[in-house]
Amino acid sequence: MEDSVNLAEKLALFEEHWSPRTVAEFNGHDVMVVKVEGEFNWHAHPDTDDFFLVLKGQIDIELRDRTVTLSAGEMFIVPRGVEHRPIAREEAHLLLIEPTGTPNTGDPDTAAKRQIV
Amino acid sequence: MEDSVNLAEKLALFEEHWSPRTVAEFNGHDVMVVKVEGEFNWHAHPDTDDFFLVLKGQIDIELRDRTVTLSAGEMFIVPRGVEHRPIAREEAHLLLIEPTGTPNTGDPDTAAKRQIV
Protein backbone atom coordinates (compact mmCIF):
# COMPACT_ATOMS: atom_id res chain seq x y z
CA MET A 1 0.00 0.00 0.00
CA GLU A 2 1.36 3.40 -0.88
CA ASP A 3 1.91 6.10 1.65
CA SER A 4 0.39 9.51 1.73
CA VAL A 5 1.21 11.86 -1.13
CA ASN A 6 2.38 15.42 -0.54
CA LEU A 7 1.40 17.25 -3.72
CA ALA A 8 3.92 20.09 -3.34
CA GLU A 9 6.74 17.60 -2.83
CA LYS A 10 5.73 15.75 -5.99
CA LEU A 11 5.58 19.01 -7.96
CA ALA A 12 9.09 19.91 -6.76
CA LEU A 13 10.49 16.83 -8.52
CA PHE A 14 10.19 18.21 -12.06
CA GLU A 15 10.09 21.41 -14.08
CA GLU A 16 8.60 20.51 -17.47
CA HIS A 17 5.30 22.02 -18.48
CA TRP A 18 2.30 20.03 -19.73
CA SER A 19 3.90 16.77 -18.61
CA PRO A 20 1.62 15.21 -15.98
CA ARG A 21 3.06 12.97 -13.26
CA THR A 22 0.90 10.23 -11.83
CA VAL A 23 1.01 10.31 -8.04
CA ALA A 24 -1.75 7.81 -7.21
CA GLU A 25 -4.33 5.54 -8.78
CA PHE A 26 -7.89 4.82 -7.73
CA ASN A 27 -10.89 3.19 -9.34
CA GLY A 28 -9.23 3.01 -12.73
CA HIS A 29 -8.15 6.66 -12.66
CA ASP A 30 -4.76 8.34 -12.49
CA VAL A 31 -4.34 11.20 -10.01
CA MET A 32 -1.74 13.52 -11.55
CA VAL A 33 0.07 16.73 -10.81
CA VAL A 34 1.17 18.97 -13.65
CA LYS A 35 2.90 22.30 -14.17
CA VAL A 36 1.48 24.37 -16.97
CA GLU A 37 2.43 27.59 -18.70
CA GLY A 38 1.35 28.96 -22.05
CA GLU A 39 -1.27 27.48 -24.34
CA PHE A 40 -2.13 23.84 -24.73
CA ASN A 41 -3.84 22.46 -27.82
CA TRP A 42 -7.55 22.32 -28.49
CA HIS A 43 -8.76 18.81 -27.81
CA ALA A 44 -11.55 16.69 -26.40
CA HIS A 45 -11.87 13.30 -24.71
CA PRO A 46 -14.85 11.60 -26.32
CA ASP A 47 -15.55 9.11 -23.53
CA THR A 48 -14.12 10.59 -20.35
CA ASP A 49 -14.78 13.60 -18.14
CA ASP A 50 -11.70 15.57 -17.21
CA PHE A 51 -11.11 16.79 -13.63
CA PHE A 52 -9.06 19.98 -13.06
CA LEU A 53 -8.21 21.48 -9.66
CA VAL A 54 -5.85 24.45 -9.48
CA LEU A 55 -3.30 24.08 -6.67
CA LYS A 56 -1.31 27.24 -7.42
CA GLY A 57 -1.70 30.13 -9.82
CA GLN A 58 -4.52 30.62 -12.30
CA ILE A 59 -5.58 29.09 -15.59
CA ASP A 60 -8.17 29.70 -18.23
CA ILE A 61 -9.94 26.73 -19.75
CA GLU A 62 -11.21 27.94 -23.09
CA LEU A 63 -14.33 26.24 -24.35
CA ARG A 64 -15.81 26.91 -27.75
CA ASP A 65 -18.58 29.08 -26.25
CA ARG A 66 -16.87 30.67 -23.25
CA THR A 67 -13.84 30.67 -20.97
CA VAL A 68 -13.71 29.25 -17.45
CA THR A 69 -11.11 30.96 -15.25
CA LEU A 70 -9.83 28.95 -12.30
CA SER A 71 -7.68 30.13 -9.40
CA ALA A 72 -6.11 28.07 -6.60
CA GLY A 73 -8.80 26.13 -4.77
CA GLU A 74 -11.12 26.10 -7.77
CA MET A 75 -12.03 23.09 -9.88
CA PHE A 76 -13.85 22.31 -13.07
CA ILE A 77 -14.98 19.16 -14.82
CA VAL A 78 -14.68 19.27 -18.59
CA PRO A 79 -17.46 16.94 -19.71
CA ARG A 80 -16.66 14.18 -22.14
CA GLY A 81 -16.70 15.28 -25.76
CA VAL A 82 -16.34 18.99 -25.00
CA GLU A 83 -13.51 20.71 -26.81
CA HIS A 84 -11.26 22.68 -24.51
CA ARG A 85 -7.92 24.43 -24.41
CA PRO A 86 -6.14 25.19 -21.13
CA ILE A 87 -4.05 28.37 -21.00
CA ALA A 88 -1.83 29.70 -18.23
CA ARG A 89 -0.36 33.18 -18.55
CA GLU A 90 2.10 32.36 -15.75
CA GLU A 91 3.12 28.98 -14.39
CA ALA A 92 0.30 27.22 -12.59
CA HIS A 93 0.12 23.88 -10.78
CA LEU A 94 -2.84 21.56 -11.23
CA LEU A 95 -4.27 18.35 -9.89
CA LEU A 96 -5.74 16.29 -12.74
CA ILE A 97 -7.78 13.12 -12.54
CA GLU A 98 -8.58 11.06 -15.60
CA PRO A 99 -9.13 7.41 -16.37
CA THR A 100 -5.74 5.72 -16.65
CA GLY A 101 -4.55 5.86 -20.25
CA THR A 102 -6.49 8.95 -21.30
CA PRO A 103 -4.23 10.85 -23.75
CA ASN A 104 -3.63 14.35 -22.38
CA THR A 105 -3.76 15.87 -25.85
CA GLY A 106 -6.84 13.89 -26.84
CA ASP A 107 -4.67 11.97 -29.31
CA PRO A 108 -2.54 8.94 -28.38
CA ASP A 109 0.02 9.91 -31.04
CA THR A 110 0.87 13.21 -29.41
CA ALA A 111 0.08 12.45 -25.78
CA ALA A 112 2.62 12.82 -22.99
CA LYS A 113 4.00 9.47 -21.89
CA ARG A 114 2.66 8.21 -18.58
CA GLN A 115 5.14 9.00 -15.82
CA ILE A 116 4.72 7.84 -12.24
CA VAL A 117 6.45 9.73 -9.43
CA MET B 1 -22.69 22.56 -18.13
CA GLU B 2 -21.84 23.56 -14.59
CA ASP B 3 -19.54 26.39 -13.78
CA SER B 4 -16.31 26.26 -11.90
CA VAL B 5 -16.46 25.21 -8.25
CA ASN B 6 -14.76 27.22 -5.52
CA LEU B 7 -14.13 24.67 -2.77
CA ALA B 8 -13.88 27.22 0.07
CA GLU B 9 -17.18 28.81 -0.98
CA LYS B 10 -18.87 25.42 -0.95
CA LEU B 11 -17.44 24.64 2.48
CA ALA B 12 -18.78 27.95 3.81
CA LEU B 13 -22.34 26.83 3.05
CA PHE B 14 -22.61 24.34 5.93
CA GLU B 15 -21.26 23.54 9.38
CA GLU B 16 -22.11 19.90 10.06
CA HIS B 17 -19.32 17.39 10.48
CA TRP B 18 -19.05 14.10 8.59
CA SER B 19 -21.76 15.19 6.16
CA PRO B 20 -20.23 15.34 2.67
CA ARG B 21 -21.59 17.72 0.05
CA THR B 22 -21.33 16.77 -3.59
CA VAL B 23 -19.91 19.66 -5.62
CA ALA B 24 -19.36 17.94 -8.97
CA GLU B 25 -19.65 14.61 -10.75
CA PHE B 26 -17.34 12.96 -13.22
CA ASN B 27 -16.94 9.47 -14.66
CA GLY B 28 -19.46 8.00 -12.25
CA HIS B 29 -17.84 9.59 -9.20
CA ASP B 30 -18.98 12.26 -6.77
CA VAL B 31 -16.51 15.00 -5.89
CA MET B 32 -17.36 16.06 -2.35
CA VAL B 33 -16.24 18.51 0.30
CA VAL B 34 -16.66 17.62 3.96
CA LYS B 35 -15.89 19.12 7.36
CA VAL B 36 -14.69 16.62 9.92
CA GLU B 37 -13.94 16.73 13.63
CA GLY B 38 -13.61 13.88 16.11
CA GLU B 39 -13.66 10.18 15.32
CA PHE B 40 -15.56 8.50 12.52
CA ASN B 41 -16.47 4.82 12.58
CA TRP B 42 -14.30 1.95 11.44
CA HIS B 43 -15.47 0.86 8.01
CA ALA B 44 -14.40 -0.38 4.59
CA HIS B 45 -15.70 -0.12 1.03
CA PRO B 46 -15.38 -3.59 -0.46
CA ASP B 47 -15.43 -2.57 -4.12
CA THR B 48 -14.24 1.03 -4.27
CA ASP B 49 -11.06 2.93 -3.53
CA ASP B 50 -11.52 6.06 -1.43
CA PHE B 51 -9.77 9.34 -2.32
CA PHE B 52 -8.90 11.80 0.49
CA LEU B 53 -7.24 15.20 0.01
CA VAL B 54 -6.86 17.52 3.00
CA LEU B 55 -7.74 21.11 2.12
CA LYS B 56 -7.36 22.58 5.62
CA GLY B 57 -6.15 21.22 8.95
CA GLN B 58 -4.92 17.72 9.62
CA ILE B 59 -6.42 14.26 9.94
CA ASP B 60 -5.30 10.81 10.89
CA ILE B 61 -6.57 7.88 8.89
CA GLU B 62 -6.23 4.90 11.16
CA LEU B 63 -5.69 1.59 9.42
CA ARG B 64 -5.56 -1.70 11.27
CA ASP B 65 -1.77 -1.85 10.98
CA ARG B 66 -0.76 1.82 11.10
CA THR B 67 -1.92 5.41 10.99
CA VAL B 68 -1.57 7.77 8.03
CA THR B 69 -1.39 11.44 9.04
CA LEU B 70 -2.40 13.96 6.39
CA SER B 71 -2.00 17.73 6.45
CA ALA B 72 -3.29 20.31 3.98
CA GLY B 73 -2.01 19.50 0.49
CA GLU B 74 -1.61 15.81 1.25
CA MET B 75 -3.73 12.98 -0.12
CA PHE B 76 -4.20 9.29 0.42
CA ILE B 77 -6.11 6.56 -1.36
CA VAL B 78 -7.69 3.99 0.95
CA PRO B 79 -7.72 0.86 -1.20
CA ARG B 80 -10.93 -1.09 -1.59
CA GLY B 81 -11.59 -3.50 1.23
CA VAL B 82 -9.18 -1.84 3.69
CA GLU B 83 -10.69 -0.98 7.05
CA HIS B 84 -10.08 2.60 8.08
CA ARG B 85 -11.16 5.20 10.58
CA PRO B 86 -10.64 8.93 9.97
CA ILE B 87 -9.97 11.08 13.03
CA ALA B 88 -9.56 14.85 13.30
CA ARG B 89 -8.47 16.37 16.60
CA GLU B 90 -9.56 19.79 15.35
CA GLU B 91 -11.88 20.65 12.50
CA ALA B 92 -10.41 19.77 9.12
CA HIS B 93 -11.72 20.22 5.58
CA LEU B 94 -11.40 17.47 3.01
CA LEU B 95 -11.97 16.79 -0.65
CA LEU B 96 -13.36 13.29 -1.14
CA ILE B 97 -13.94 11.42 -4.37
CA GLU B 98 -15.87 8.17 -4.48
CA PRO B 99 -18.13 6.40 -6.95
CA THR B 100 -21.58 7.97 -6.75
CA GLY B 101 -23.65 6.10 -4.19
CA THR B 102 -20.77 4.80 -2.06
CA PRO B 103 -22.02 4.86 1.57
CA ASN B 104 -19.67 7.09 3.62
CA THR B 105 -19.94 4.78 6.62
CA GLY B 106 -19.52 1.64 4.54
CA ASP B 107 -23.14 0.76 5.35
CA PRO B 108 -26.13 2.11 3.39
CA ASP B 109 -28.27 2.00 6.56
CA THR B 110 -26.10 4.50 8.42
CA ALA B 111 -24.66 6.49 5.51
CA ALA B 112 -25.09 10.25 5.20
CA LYS B 113 -27.72 11.15 2.65
CA ARG B 114 -26.36 12.44 -0.65
CA GLN B 115 -26.49 16.23 -0.67
CA ILE B 116 -25.58 18.33 -3.68
CA VAL B 117 -24.47 21.93 -3.19
Image (tube, coloured by chain):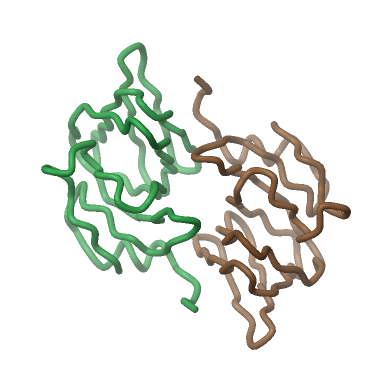
Chain colours: A green, B brown
Outermost bottom residue = B65
The image quarter in which residue A67 lies: top left
Outermost front residue = B47
* Residue occupying the point 69% across, 74% down: B83
Outermost top residue = A65
Of B84 and B14, the residue lying toward us: B84
Of B80 and A66, the residue lying toward us: B80
* Residue occupying the point 56% across, 69% down: B79
Outermost left residue = A109
In the rendered structure, the answer to whether residue B8 lies left or right of residue A49 reads right
Asked if A96 appears above or below A38 in the picture, the reply is below
* Residue occupying the point 29% across, 59% down: A21
Count the labels in the image. 0
Asked if A90 appears above or below A9 in the picture, the reply is above
Quadrant containing the C terminus of chain B in the rendered view: top right
Residue B13 in the image: x percent, y percent? 74, 35
* Residue occupying the point 78% across, 48% down: B19
Residue A2 in the image: x percent, y percent? 46, 76
Residue A29 in the image: x percent, y percent? 42, 53
In the rendered structure, the answer to whether residue A89 lies left or right of residue A75 reads left
Residue B90 in the image: x percent, y percent? 75, 65
